[in-house]
Amino acid sequence: MEDEQTAPRRNFYGRVHGKTLRASQKDYLANDLEALSLRGVTHSENPARALINPAQVFGADRPLWLEVGFGGGEHLVHMASLYPEVSIIGAEPFVNGIAMLLGKIRLAGVENLLIHPGDVRDLFDVLPQQSLSKVFLNYPDPWPKARHHRRRFVTPGYLALLARAMKPGAEFRVATDIPDYVRQTLEEVPQAGFELINQTGQGQAWDDWLSTRYEQKALREGRDPHYLTFRRHA
């Protein structure tokens, strides 16, 4: 693995800070984040980029799932509550979203969930190959301008890292309300080693789906959800 001095620098374009945090959210960040953060991911903690052992991190050898960009965290906590037999990582750099998730975790009391509060590519660096059984990408940043489409998650740079980390036969779910994001997803994801197994629209989400606040906003504004399910090739 490359050390910190030779590792390529990555541009990160998403938001990290938003509106002023409420007192309760500052409390969550101050008192809960450290205990719920996945260790060994950041360059300062792991400059040699040594692989982590998810079974050791979670204290159990269970299926490992990932949500990329968990927003306010409602879907992530829902999945952790619904499937206590799995281990789940949520990756999100946006501080306000992290604070909202921490509040939901405290309320729900789930214990099979850890957070990477940063760029998901740093997490992919240290996950063992073929370690993920399921990955969720729910209402990702659409980057609507054509010149910014290369910043989307469904581009070769991200997808190659994703494919490396997923088990053969693992499921990759994408939910979005942006037709052009659907177009790019259908073009790029199969080229990265995935097979499209289902594509549905409004009212036809997955059986265990929890509609997020981003989806509710899309519906209020007249945009239709799209749900795409892919399987990692063997």
Image (tube, rainbow, N blue to C red):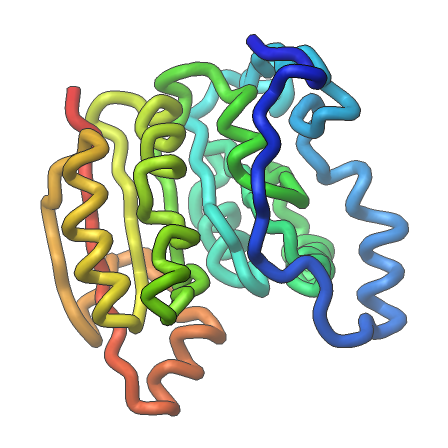
Residue 183 at x, y = what percent? Answer: 18, 60
Tally of marks: 0
Relative to 158, residue 124 above or below: above
Which residue is farthest front?
Answer: 147
Of 58 and 222, nearer the camera is 222
Residue at position x 24%, y 58% in the image: 206
From the image, which quarter does the C terminus lie in?
top left
Residue at position x 39%, y 29% in the image: 161
Of 183 and 204, nearer the camera is 183
From the image, which quarter does the N terminus lie in?
top right
Residue 191 at x, y = what percent? Answer: 16, 36
**Quadrant of residue 123 within the rendered picture:** top right
- Residue 92 appears left or right of 177: right
Of 64 and 148, nearer the camera is 148
Relative to 215, residue 77 above or below: above
Relative to 88, residue 97 above or below: below
Residue 147 at x, y = what percent? Answer: 37, 62
Residue at position x 58%, y 48% in the image: 12
**Quadrant of residue 167 within the rendered picture:** top left
Residue 129 at x, y = what percent? Answer: 40, 16
